[in-house]
Image: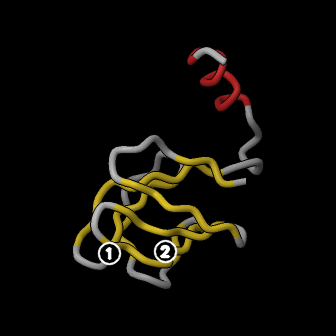
């Protein structure tokens, strides 16, 4: 699938289908999390923002949980879609 088709698919997907979650930074044990293009939010383990709960943050990665699914986010990667 080319980049244009992928972007079009992501833009036309229903909002309830998935959330885009990205890691913008790490501050000690807190993670700066971006949800659906929001302003980055600093979360400590156990805290939630827009349905995304931070499980752990360490080094250049963070583990989050959305709707019971855990995902590992890494700095510099594109947002992941959590279904």
Query: Which residue is denoted by mark 1 in the rendering?
Result: 30
Q: Quadrant of residue 50?
A: bottom right
Q: Which mark is residue 54?
A: 2
Q: Given the current orientation, which residue lies at the most extreme left position?
A: 28
Q: Position of residue 4 (x, y in %)?
A: 59, 15
Separation of residues labelled 1 and 2 (CA atoms): 9 Å
Nearer the observer, 1 or 68: 1
The structure's colour scheme is secondary structure
Whole-percent x, y for residue 9 in the image: 70, 26
Q: Is residue 48 left or right of residue 60?
A: right
Where disc 2 sits, the SS reads: strand
Asked if labels 2 and 1 touch by Cβ distance under 8 angstroms, the answer is yes
Give x and y (percent) for residue 13: 74, 35
The residue drawn where x is 66% and y is 32% is 10
Q: Residue at x 50, y 61 (%)?
A: 72
Is 82 or 59 nearer to us in this picture? 59
Figure quadrant of the N terminus: top right
Q: Is residue 70 above or below residue 11?
A: below
Dot 1: element: strand
């Amino acid at each position: 699938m080319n980049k244009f088709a992928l972007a079009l698919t992501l833009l036309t997907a229903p909002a309830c289908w998935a959330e885009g979650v990205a890691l913008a930074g790490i501050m000690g044990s807190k993670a700066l999390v971006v949800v659906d293009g929001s302003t980055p939010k600093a979360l400590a383990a156990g805290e939630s923002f827009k349905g995304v709960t931070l499980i752990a943050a360490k080094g250049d990665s963070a583990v989050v949980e959305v709707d019971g699914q855990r995902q590992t986010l890494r700095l510099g990667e594109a947002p992941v879609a959590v279904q």
